[in-house]
Image (cartoon, grey):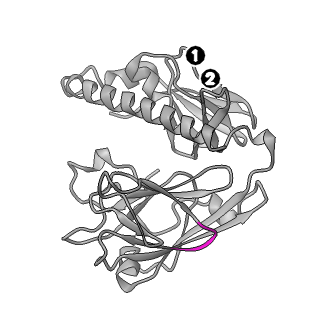
Amino acid sequence: MSFRFQESRRFAPGEIVIREGDDSDEAYMIRAGTAEVLKRASSGKDVRIAVLDEGEIFGEMALILDRPRSATVRARSDLVVDVFDPEAFTCLFKAHEGLLLRPIFQVLCERLRVADARVAELEGRSGGPADEGEGLPLHMVVEICPASEAAKASLQGLESVPVAKFPFRVGRQDGDERHSPFHANDLCLLDAEPFSVSPSHFAVVRSQDTCFFQDRSSKHGSLVNGKRVGGGFRNAGRVPLRCGKNSVRLGGRESELLYSVLVKQEETGVGPFWQRLRGYLHLPFAG
């Protein structure tokens, strides 16, 4: 079934698309521009928990759970969004298969709400990103480069991959159609059995002035600058990435999938042109 759109709407930079706590029955897909997701922490501070780019969907949780908006979405640039037809969206859950899946999606959405609230709370305590009017944010230039032949093969021979958005999600290219609906990645890596890379392995995320390596409940975890991340409850789930070169090994200590994550900070709000280009890399990206 294909989605139907009611209309397209335009927003200027800084304009609110949806506001936390409001009632609404609309979901949106970004056609052009970028937006940021803001969550109100207990301190009263709005904390940015995500940046959305072209092709990404937001507002769907309110439709599934029939609850007020869990976060605010604000335009970061000139923004054009397509508004989903609510009836077309909810029809997905009225068919027999949809009725079976609806409870699962409700649980997942509720867990995501809790996780977003927790992220906002932690970011608020640590001085994480808030209103960009407080100061010019640092522009992060991040690249993922292979540091071994196995890593280069996983990138299909590419020498580097620019991190064009945050969060930037990385996982294994999985040919099993049973798993594909449950994993959304911006970069898919080739791997062979016994797998070192999980279908949802890690993400590069950022705050106002820091980039982080975030585990995504990977099976074998990673080694980031010699520190074990993910792969078990006793391991850290998130570590900061330093400016310059960061060593990242996906999987166990014997894994040959070794990468360098290069981080550079620039005091500018405008990214290089190549960061605006999407889909030109010959890799199985997902939006």
The answer to whether one can see residue 103 in this image is yes
Q: Residue 16, relative to residue 146: is it above or below? A: above
User: Do the CB atoms of the residues marked 2 and 1 lie less than 8 Å apart?
Assistant: yes
* Type of amino acid at the residue the image marks with label 2: Arg
Please give the name of the residue rendered at 52% of the width and 75% of the height, measured from the top-left corner: 160
Q: Secondary structure at mark 2?
A: loop
Q: Secondary structure at mark 1?
A: loop
Taking 91 as reference, is 177 left or right? left
Magenta segment includes 243: yes
Q: Residue furthest bottom?
A: 149
The residue at which mark 2 appears reads as 19
Front-most of residues 211 and 145 = 211
The residue at which mark 1 appears reads as 22
Q: Classify 10 Å Cα crowding around label 2: few (below 14), some (14-19), many (20 and above).
A: some
Q: Classify 10 Å Cα crowding around label 1: few (below 14), some (14-19), many (20 and above).
A: few
The span picked out in magenta is 242-246
The answer to whether one can see residue 4 in this image is no
Taking 3 as reference, is 96 left or right? left
Magenta segment includes 184: no
Residue 109 lies in quadrant: top left
Please give the name of the residue rendered at 24% of the width and 60% of the height, measured from the top-left corner: 175
Please give the name of the residue rendered at 63% of the width and 56% of the height, measured from the top-left corner: 210
- Quadrant of the frame with the N terminus: top left
Residue 231: image x %, image y %? 30, 58
